[in-house]
Image (cartoon, rainbow, N blue to C red):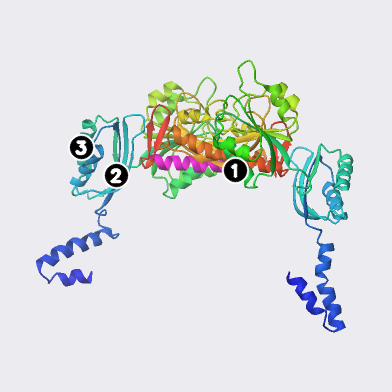
Amino acid sequence: MTLLRRTAYSSSASSSILQIAGTFFRAPHSSTAAVAGSTYGVHVFQCPDTVGIVAKLSECIASHGGNIHSVDVFVPEDRRVFYSRSEFVFDPARWPRVLMDNDFSNLSKFFNAKISIVRVPDLEPKHKIGVLASKQEHCLVDLLHEWQDGRLPVDIKCVISSNHERAPNTHVIRFLERHGIPYHCLPTSPGNKREDEILNLVKDTDFLVLARYMQILSGRFLDSYGKDIINIHHGLLPSFRGGNPSKQAYDAGVKLIGATSHFVTEGLDAGPIIEQMVERVSHRDNLRSFVQKSENLEKQCLGKAIKSYCELRVLPYELKKTVVF
Amino acid sequence: MVVAGASSSSSSSILGIASGFFSRALHSSKTSSGPPTAVHGIHVFHCPDVVGIVAKLSECIALRGGNIHSVDVFVPENKQVFYSRCEFVFHPARWPRDEINNDFMKLSKLFNAERSVVRVPYLDPKYKIAVLASKQDHCLFDLLHRWQEGRLPVDISCVISNHVRSPNTHVIRFLERHGIPYHHLPTTPRNKREDEILELVADTDFLVLARYMQILSGRFLESYGKDIINIHHGLLPSFKGGNPSKQAFDAGVKLIGATSHFVTEELDSGAIIEQMVERVSHRDTLQSFVQKSENLEKQCLAQALKSYCELQVLHCDTNKTVVF
């Protein structure tokens, strides 16, 4: 704003001043050229490590007028693997989306990359997710509210619940109706986990969120779905796997309890960990306050994990770990 | 001072007040003549819960001119058990040390207490401890330095190790300087030297395992009979046993921790006293996992010992603690 007003003023000055002024005040015009536009892009890259990757990636962005704002690079001590995440701003007029994909694809081939993903949030559809829940609502409700507040940049395709019927006048059902999000109640039994129906309902999604979904998804389901599934476990893994970890923790007399969000694999509560959070407990806590503190942690931990994932901060690392930039 | 001098020529009533007030002030300033008149005491109590315990305990203290400064009371929701810890100041002239013991003993019997302990740090001997360590030094060092700085109010009877340390190492020179015996008792799978250890620690009030890597048998624990505090370099119950840093590193956790706890026959399973965590990420190597862990172990063990010495730690249920 200030720059534009100065330009108008300098137009009535002498030519020499004008010239200097022009050079100086060319800023507004040059800002659209030197400043690279204001569309925001994120690129993540994983490939075998070698000299020159950062140089080539950054040159690729710069040669199209992109301005890099943030780079995280990580090469582990003992393995020749390269991970990077770059945030940059660019002008889609100068660097159209399709060309961008091609350019990064070329680099990906050049470096034999395992992962090369570019995302331009403003130009692309949001991540489509399916949310699975059971009786416990706190994570589901928190997720829905965060989404409504615009803090969870996803498209919720549907909510699927096992076992638990929610009556039409409950908060969750009314919320989902108001926002046009389908709710599917698929009661499970030991012999039938309704996996085929679930697969059908979620086949268009980009990833799934298990918001205290208490059914175990089979290896077959995981293979068929094929995409990432993020779970929240209400314990500090690997402590207290399985059911009722709050009670397990309470009985164990621990002084810290926690929550863990992780990718789902065939082993129960064993997939790569994305985020963990703790809170102190003491003799003054009873089982109820253990549970309350735990629920609070679960909401925060799951929310953080989903945001990190959507921002392309989470990359698989070795077999059981994650890089979280 | 001046007023006291002036008051010596005033009426007896002012003198009475003045001498009471200023004599206390004079005595409570650091002079070479005897202890301060007001002394700190701590009392912990654990008994079946009934109405009236706090009333009786506080009355007992007040009757003797004791002034209660702090009280923690805890009665669990679902059990009729009472725990309390009281800090008070009193005058030994009005309430002699052995009478304190008697008075609380009466209350202990009245309420059928499981535990009633009173401690007057200024008058009572410090807790006598023995420290057991293996090869890893960091917890032992930290403990010894805190002790030297007066932050660990104990008397270290001896240090026992299954790891040999040569005379010119920091630990050995430190112990020599302070006249603390160091006993090297190498163990083998068949011989854990437990009888010798028992003999060396017979006079101690409790033991500290500062990264002692041998498992003490049930027989040892029964024979010793007193509390043993251990530091485990993992966030129990995760990563019990050996090399928890590596276990944690391989598991890809985002938080690592340390746990101090009482020793029971089962490995790393006794009642937990204190836990601490620190964040780790993909940028951490096994080495930085270990470094962060060592830092946590030192703090966690120190905190546990401090709480224990201040009578803040009480056993609760079979495997838990109340830590006031």
Which is more foreground, mark 3 or mark 1? 1
Q: What element carries label 2?
A: loop
Amino acid, disc 3: Asn
Q: Mark 3 points at which residue?
A: B102
The residue where tag 1 is placed is A145
Residue carrying label 2: B120
Q: Give the range drawn in magenta.
A: B290-308
Task: Look at the numbered disc 3 and give the secondary structure of its residue.
Answer: helix
Within 10 Å of the Cα at label 3, are there few (<14), some (14-19), or many (20+) other Cα atoms?
few
Which residue is outermost to the left? B12
* Label of residue B33 in the image: none
Say what amino acid the circle numbered 1 marks.
Answer: His
The chain identifier of the residue carrying mark 2 reads: B
Picture quarter with the C terminus of chain B: top left
Q: Nearer the viewer, residue B140 or A179?
A: A179
- The answer for how far apart the CA atoms under marks 1 and 2 are is 56 Å
Seen at 81% across and 74% down, the residue is A24
User: Is residue B229 in view?
Assistant: no
Q: Looking at the image, tell me whether mark 3 or mark 2 is earlier in sequence order.
A: 3
